[in-house]
């Protein structure tokens, strides 16, 4: 049984077939139009951002390399070595070893402090759960994203490295910009 | 009556001719990197990019880096290759390209240090035929290269190249017939001098368009770059070539661009002549070079604009459009030339 098209038959519009004379004439006009288009691109100039020299500013909420923070007035570390960040980390890349603060050696504002605080950035997935888990805002996600290294051990960042200011500040853009 | 095949007009003693040929060779070697860089820079700008800008100031040393890279590569040869021909093919391409370059007139006979010197490699009575003869020999470079590589992609590319070049050479030659009939000479310097009243681009506009279109096909440039067709054929006839052999092909391709640009300038744009002003003799080569670079810009512009043709489109365009158009152009010109004289 053959299929007979009903009233819903579609009429397909086809592009003009490339003929000899008419097709050439059309193609010539379209070629000129194309040349105009490309020439306009030439005058617009390059849109390239030459990356190592110029950088695209990151957003304030950009989740880059972690930062540890100190209190601005006392200079004490905010981290109290509670290991909640390590517990929250899905990639298991944070290692915290806590120690007691003593009156002679006061490092943090709480009872204890992080004697060892290491983040293995080769494992980190930059999810930001550590930042959410931290009860004292001691760890936040910074704005640095240039973290390539020649070997894996260089990617284990220690407490001192995380506490220091980054060597080069990443350009930041305002919210909504 | 002399029995030479071609009358060659000599204006200077033999040692000047040797110096001239060396200078022309060096000129070709010097211009090709400039064209190379100009193409990559312009193509970048056409696509909102910078193009090469890492090597040297503004990337000016990029061609140098390319050449060093190619020259220091391992000479590689597939085990299926026919060794002798495989090595010979790029040389043929290079040789024919440079030989055709020798005929471009860069100026009239000038007086340099009290010595009459024609600012061209040689002025042959058969001018245009010389160019087409070397263009025809250049096929062997591509065909031998593709066949001697012993690779199916090379062979396919070479077959395409041969079919394309033969098809378009007919239209290219016919498009120049109008100019030759109007000028009444085959000598390139003679044709330039015949254009002192009006450049042939005006009366021979159709011929000019046909010539430029065919020139794109002759030099395997986009949109007629089917012999190379990166997407389909890897790289066409030069797939199996690397290092300095590939550099020879590459160099020949760009010299060919300069040659067809130079022929177009000579035939249609008045060679070294400028409208209204008549500059002194030493400016002539720069005028020609400037006009050639206008064509190089056109080559890049077209390459940035048009997509590659399908193979059947290429063939039908060459045989069904360009060839009849060129023939009609030649016929009409012949009738007009006879009617006027």
Image (spheres, grey):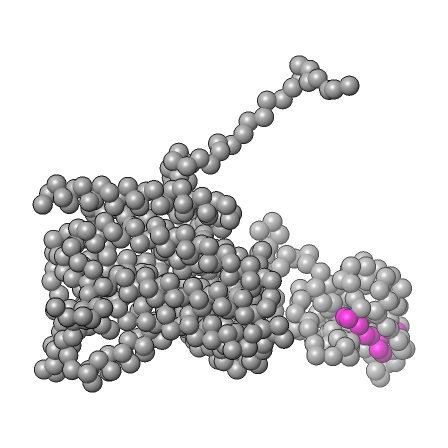
Give the image location of residue A136, x and y in percent.
81, 63
- Closer to the camera in the image, A34 or B250: B250
Asked whether residue B282 is in view, the answer is: no
Is B293 or B121 nearer to us in this picture?
Answer: B121
- Residue B81 coordinates in the image, percent (x, y): 58, 73
Residue B65: x percent and y percent? Answer: 48, 77
Could you tell whether B280 is left or right of B149 in the image? left
Above or below, A68 relative to B217: below
| Residue drawn 86% across the image and 61% down it | A90
Residue displayed at 23% across by 54% down: B268
In the rendered image, the vertical position of residue A97 relative to residue B130, given as above or below: below
Q: Residue at x 40, y 39 (%)?
A: A24
Q: Quadrant of residue B99?
A: bottom left
What segment is highlighted magenta in the picture? A112-122
User: Residue A94: percent from the left, percent from the top?
Assistant: 84, 70
Q: Is residue A118 magenta?
A: yes
Place residue A102 in its image quadrant. Answer: bottom right
Outermost residue to the top = A7
Is B24 magenta? The answer is no
Q: Is residue A92 visible?
A: yes
């Amino acid at each position: 049984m053959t299929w007979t098209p009903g009233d819903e038959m579609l009429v397909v519009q086809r592009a003009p077939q490339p003929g000899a004379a008419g097709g050439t004439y059309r193609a010539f006009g379209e070629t000129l139009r194309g040349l105009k288009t490309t020439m306009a691109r030439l005058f617009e100039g390059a849109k390239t951002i030459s990356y190592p020299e110029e950088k695209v500013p990151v957003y304030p909420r950009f989740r880059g390399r972690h930062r540890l923070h100190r209190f601005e007035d006392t200079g004490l570390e905010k981290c109290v070595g509670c290991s909640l960040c390590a517990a929250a980390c899905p990639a298991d890349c944070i290692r915290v070893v806590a120690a007691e603060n003593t009156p002679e050696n006061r490092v943090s504002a709480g009872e204890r402090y992080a004697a060892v605080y290491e983040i293995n950035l080769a494992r980190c997935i930059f999810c930001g759960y550590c930042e959410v888990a931290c009860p004292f805002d001691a760890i936040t996600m910074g704005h640095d994203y240039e973290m390539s290294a020649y070997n894996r051990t260089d990617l284990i960042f220690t407490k001192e490295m995380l506490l220091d200011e980054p060597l080069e500040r990443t350009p930041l853009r305002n919210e909504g910009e | 009556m002399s029995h030479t095949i071609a009358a060659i007009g000599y204006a200077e003693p033999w040692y000047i001719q040797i110096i001239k040929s060396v200078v022309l060779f060096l000129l070709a070697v010097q211009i090709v990197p400039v064209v190379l860089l100009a193409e990559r820079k312009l193509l970048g700008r056409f696509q909102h990019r910078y193009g090469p800008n890492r090597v040297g100031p503004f990337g000016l040393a990029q061609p140098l880096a390319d050449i060093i890279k190619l020259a220091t590569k391992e000479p590689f040869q597939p085990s299926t290759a026919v060794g002798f021909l495989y090595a010979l093919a790029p040389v043929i391409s290079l040789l024919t390209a440079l030989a055709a370059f020798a005929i471009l007139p860069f100026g009239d006979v000038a007086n340099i240090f009290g010595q009459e010197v024609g600012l061209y490699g040689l002025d042959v009575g058969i001018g245009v035929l010389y160019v087409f003869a070397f263009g025809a020999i250049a096929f062997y470079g591509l065909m031998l290269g593709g066949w001697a590589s012993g690779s199916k992609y090379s062979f396919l590319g070479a077959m395409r190249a041969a079919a394309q070049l033969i098809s378009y050479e007919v239209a290219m030659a016919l498009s120049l017939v109008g100019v030759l009939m109007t000028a009444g000479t085959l000598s390139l310097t003679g044709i330039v001098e015949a254009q002192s009243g009006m450049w042939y681009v005006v009366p021979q506009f159709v011929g000019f368009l046909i010539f430029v279109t065919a020139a794109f096909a002759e030099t395997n440039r986009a949109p007629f770059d089917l012999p190379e067709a990166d997407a389909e054929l890897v790289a066409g006839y030069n797939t199996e070539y690397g290092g300095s052999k590939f550099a020879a092909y590459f160099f020949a391709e760009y010299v060919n661009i300069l040659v067809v640009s130079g022929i177009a300038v000579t035939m249609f744009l008045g060679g070294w002549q400028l409208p209204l002003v008549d500059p002194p003799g030493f400016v002539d080569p720069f005028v020609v070079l400037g006009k050639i670079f206008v064509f190089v810009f056109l080559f890049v512009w077209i390459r940035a604009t048009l997509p590659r043709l399908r193979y059947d489109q290429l063939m039908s365009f060459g045989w069904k459009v360009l060839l009849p158009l060129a023939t009609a152009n030649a016929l009409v010109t012949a009738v007009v030339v006879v009617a006027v004289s």
